[in-house]
Image (spheres, rainbow, N blue to C red):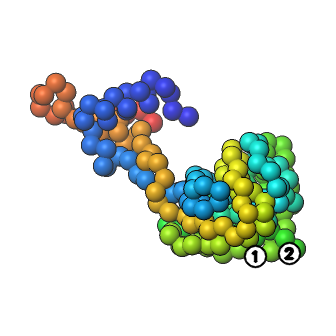
Amino acid sequence: MIDGTVAGLAAGLLATGAVDAAGVCRRTKRIDVPGAGGADFALIDAAVCLDRFAGTRAIWDPGRITALVLARAEPWAVGLSSIGGQLRCVGDGDPLGLLVELGPGPTVRAVLAPGLVVEVPIRAWRPLELGEDVWLEAGGGTIALDGERELVAPGRVCARVSRSGPRVVDIRAVLARGGAAPSGGGPARDPVPEAWHFI
């Protein structure tokens, strides 16, 4: 957790140009779903669901899911991405995604919600290159995006993991650079002695 005052200070340093955004911001991944009842995207997971209606809710039952496309998959995560995290750890900085097909096969134990640990059968899985198109058979069901919204999918749907997500600010890097920047147009301050640094 980052304190709100600290985050605000970092935002101010970026907004005023005191710190160059190029060195402290990075572009995250996202999952583009260009043709499922209107183009949309997810930041973490896109799930092919058997449900034939749309509704805004989290998915708790992996039996409703036939496939997952994941931009991130970490074993310590809570939610659908934890399923992929049990197969291969994929962080936001990794230049790949995962395709996971659920169905008869070996199981993994995943945390889908706080206090909800579920055995999930895996039919197949593989890494996805950034920009690689993968075709998902939705069969008239829906595509759930980050568990927040769903798209009606009448048939086959294309999805791809790309590096076109939102930019994320490294607050610690902003403040580290801002602390060494000149203030009020004067000369750069001497660095604080090592013994005074707080971690």
On the image, the x and y values in percent for residue 157 come to 66, 67
Q: Residue, x 47% and y 48% (percent of image)?
A: 166
On the image, the x and y values in percent for residue 25 come to 38, 47
Q: Residue, x 35% and y 46% (percent of image)?
A: 24
Quote the CA–CA distance across marks 2 and 1.
8 Å
Q: Is residue 108 left or right of residue 152?
A: right
Q: Residue, x 31% and y 35% (percent of image)?
A: 14
The local crowd at label 1, few if under 14, some if 14 to 19, many if 20 or more residues have their Cα within 10 Å, is some
Q: What amino acid is at disc 1? A: Ala
> Does residue 192 show up?
no
Q: Are marks 2 and 1 in contact (CB under 8 Å)?
A: yes
Q: Secondary structure at mark 2?
A: strand
Q: Residue, x 46% and y 57% (percent of image)?
A: 164
On the image, the x and y values in percent for residue 120 come to 84, 63
The local crowd at label 2, few if under 14, some if 14 to 19, many if 20 or more residues have their Cα within 10 Å, is few
Camera-nearest residue between 181 and 7: 7
Q: Disc 2 marks which residue?
A: 105
Q: Secondary structure at mark 1?
A: strand
Q: Is residue 123 above or below residue 171?
A: below
On the image, the x and y values in percent for residue 113 come to 79, 45
Q: Is residue 149 left or right of residue 62?
A: left
Q: Disc 1 marks which residue?
A: 124
Q: Quadrant of the N terminus?
A: top right
